Image (tube, rainbow, N blue to C red):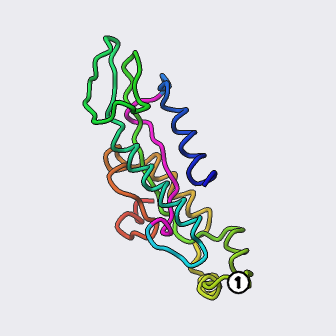
Amino acid sequence: MRINVEGPLFLTQQLLSPPSPHLNHESRVLFVGSGAAHKPYHSWGGYCMSKAALHMMYQVFKEEKTTVTSESGQDNMSTDSKDSPISSSRLVLPPRFGSIRPGVVDTPMQQTLRTAQDFENVQFFKNLKEEGKLVSSEKVAKFIDFLLHDTEPDEFERDEWDIRDAAHQSRW
């Protein structure tokens, strides 16, 4: 929970409260999600729950980002949340919030999974490696660069981005 929930939460809160004068509506915060947030895996309870919590955090920040206070102290945009960390005595437009599902990435964690003796899905991950179906960290980095620099602001935060979605792969 500390890595997948507390870290992103506290970093984002620090960024937003008080809002940095460098933030604007073109600024972006990108959360790194997982398919495990949407589908349970045997013996991955903590990981699945933490990624599900991160996904909800992304959705909440995206929903609550509309609170912006002008120098006069009046809201320029409406919100249902009075506890939003996005308010200030100066006009600051909140950043855009996005989320990426990078796929099954070839990382040291994957190597550990493939050697686990007590992991029910070990063969599945061994097969992914043997069949060349793991995503390289370089490919994920290229995808993240595309999301942060080459998407329109509304497009960036519209939906969670999945690296496997062929509809956008030709763009990066």
Identify the element where label 1 is drawn. Answer: loop
Is residue 58 part of the magenta span, yes or no? no
Side (left or right) of 70 relative to 102: left
Where residue 73 appears, as percent x and y from the top left, is 32, 14
Q: Could you tell me the amino acid type at mark 1?
A: Asp
Side (left or right) of 160 relative to 133: left
- Using the image as rendered, state which of residue 167 and residue 161 is in the foreground: 161
Which residue carries the number 1 mark? Answer: 118
Q: The N terminus appears in which quarter of the rendering?
A: bottom right
Side (left or right) of 100 relative to 64: right
Where residue 166 appears, as percent x and y from the top left, is 38, 70
Q: The C terminus appears in which quarter of the rendering?
A: bottom left
Above or below for 94 versus 138? above
Where residue 112 appears, as percent x and y from the top left, is 73, 74
Residue at (55% x, 61% y) in the render: 140
Where residue 25 appears, as percent x and y from the top left, is 37, 33
Above or below for 109 versus 121? above
**Region rendered in magenta:** 23-37
How packed is label 1: few (under 14 Cα within 10 Å), some, or many (20 or more)? few
Above or below for 131 versus 45? below
Residue at (64% x, 71% y) in the render: 106
